[in-house]
Image (cartoon, rainbow, N blue to C red):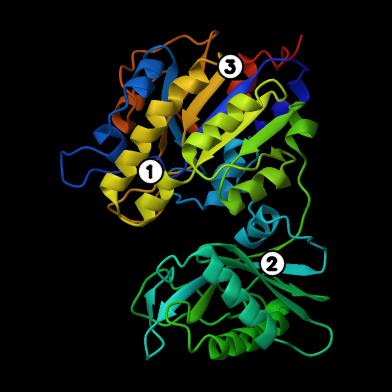
Amino acid sequence: MDPELIDKLVIPGNTKIVFLIMDGLGGLPREEGGLTELESARRPNMNALARVSLCGLLDPVAPGVTPGSGPAHFALFGYDPVKNNIGRGILEGAGIDYPMTDRDLLIRVNFATADGEGRVVDRRAGRIDTETNRRVCAKLQEAVRLGPGIEVFFEPVKEHRALLVLRGDGLEDRIQETDPQKTGVPPLPPAPLSPAAEATSRILEEVVGRAHAALADEPKANTLLLRGYARYRRYPSLRERFLLNPLAVAVYPMYRGIARLLGMTVAGGADTIEKEFALVRENYGTYDFFFLHVKPTDSRGEDGDFEGKVKVIEEVDALLPQLVDLEPDVLVVTGDHSTPAVLASHSWHPVPVILHARTCRPDRVEVFSERSCAAGGLGRMPMVRLMGLALAHAGRLEKFGA
C-alpha cells in the first residue's frame, strides 16, 4: 500500500492501536543449525498471541539494506524511509528537546576511548554514565570556542552519547562521519562530501582538534566520534496524516526525539521496561495510538551479548499480557530492525512481526520467530506498509474508489 494513498483514505475513529517495538529484535544463530535470540527465549505469551494473529517479516528499507534507527522508525510509522531519511543529529536534538533553529547543524557525538597512538579502542567509551557525560560536555563547552559568526554547543544525551550543535549561516551537512565503525584505527577526518561543504568541514576540523586537546586527560572519554549530520526540517505529524492522538513511551532520547518530530506526546517517568508498560496502562484512556519502545534488546545485541538479549525478550514476554488485557483494536509486536548479537551491529535481515486484531484472518504460525514468521500470512513486505494495515484493521481507512 502506497504510504501517500493512506493519507487520502484516513477517517476519524475512536479505536486504539498499540505498537510494541523491541528495538533490534531480529537475530541470528550462534552456530549453524542453532537458534536465534528470539527462538532461544521463553516466550509463551508471544507464541500464544502469534497463534491468533497474522504474522510475517518486515524489511525496514529494502532487502539487503542495513537500516539506521531513524529510517527504520520512520518506516514503522508509515513514512517513506528513503524520502524522509534524516541524520541522527536532529533525532538526538529532538530527543532532549533542544531548541533547534534553521541555522543549526546538529551532529550526534559518541564519546570514545583512543590509545596513545590515537587509535580507537572502544567506540562507546565503556558506556560512561550520564553524569560523566554531563561533566565532559561542560568541559568541552568551555574549551571549544570559535570566531565570530559560529556558535558551538555541546549537550549531554545519555551514557556515551551527546549532541554537538554548530549555529551559523550557510552550514552544510554533506560531511564524512568520523566514526570508523571499528576499533584499532584512528577516527576519520570530517572531510567534505561536496564542494559546498568545504567551509563547514574546516570548521569541524577545528572543533575536533580543540575537543581532542581538551579531552586528553580523560581516562575513558578521551576522543569523540561524529555521526548523523543534519539540518532541521519539519515533518507532518501522525495527527495531521492519520488523525491519531499518539503517545510515545520511550526511555532513550533518540526515540523520544523521533516521537516529537512526528507530533507524538512523549510520556515521562519510566526508567525500566516494567514502568514503560505501566505508563501505557495509565494513559490508555487518553490516547488512541501508543508507541512503546524497548531499547535493551538492541543494546544487548550491539554488545554481542546473546544471552542478555534473550533475557530482555523474556522480560517483555512476561509483561505482554498487560497490553493484551487492554484489548486494543490492533496490537502490533515487532522490532525496528535486526541486531544479531553474533554481528554486534544492525543488519539487513527482515524483522518478525505479529499483527493482532479482531478483523485478522489468523494464519498457521504457531510460534513467534524469524523462521516461523517467514511462512506467515503477511508474507515479507516493506515495513512502511505496516501502518496502513494497522489503520485498516482499526477501521480508520475508507474504501478506495467507487
Disc on res. 328: 3
The Cα–Cα distance between marks 3 and 2, rounded to whole angstroms, is: 38 Å
Counting residues from the start of the chain, the first of labels 2 and 1 encountered is 2
The residue at the point 34 percent across, 56 percent down is 344
For residue 196, which quarter of the picture? bottom right
**Apparent side of residue 295 relative to residue 233 in the rendered image (left or right):** left
Q: Position of residue 205 (x, y in %)?
A: 62, 86
Q: Position of residue 323 (x, y in %)?
A: 51, 22
The residue at the point 15 percent across, 44 percent down is 32
Counting residues from the start of the chain, the first of labels 3 and 1 encountered is 3
For residue 88, which quarter of the picture? bottom right
Q: Which residue is mark 1?
A: 349
**Apparent side of residue 35 relative to residue 158 in the rendered image (left or right):** left
Q: Amino acid at mark 3?
A: Pro
Say which of marks 2 and 1 sits in front: 2
Task: Please indicate, yes or no, whether residue 34 appears anywhere in the rendered image.
Answer: yes
In the image, residue 126 sits, relative to residue 303, either above or below, namely: below
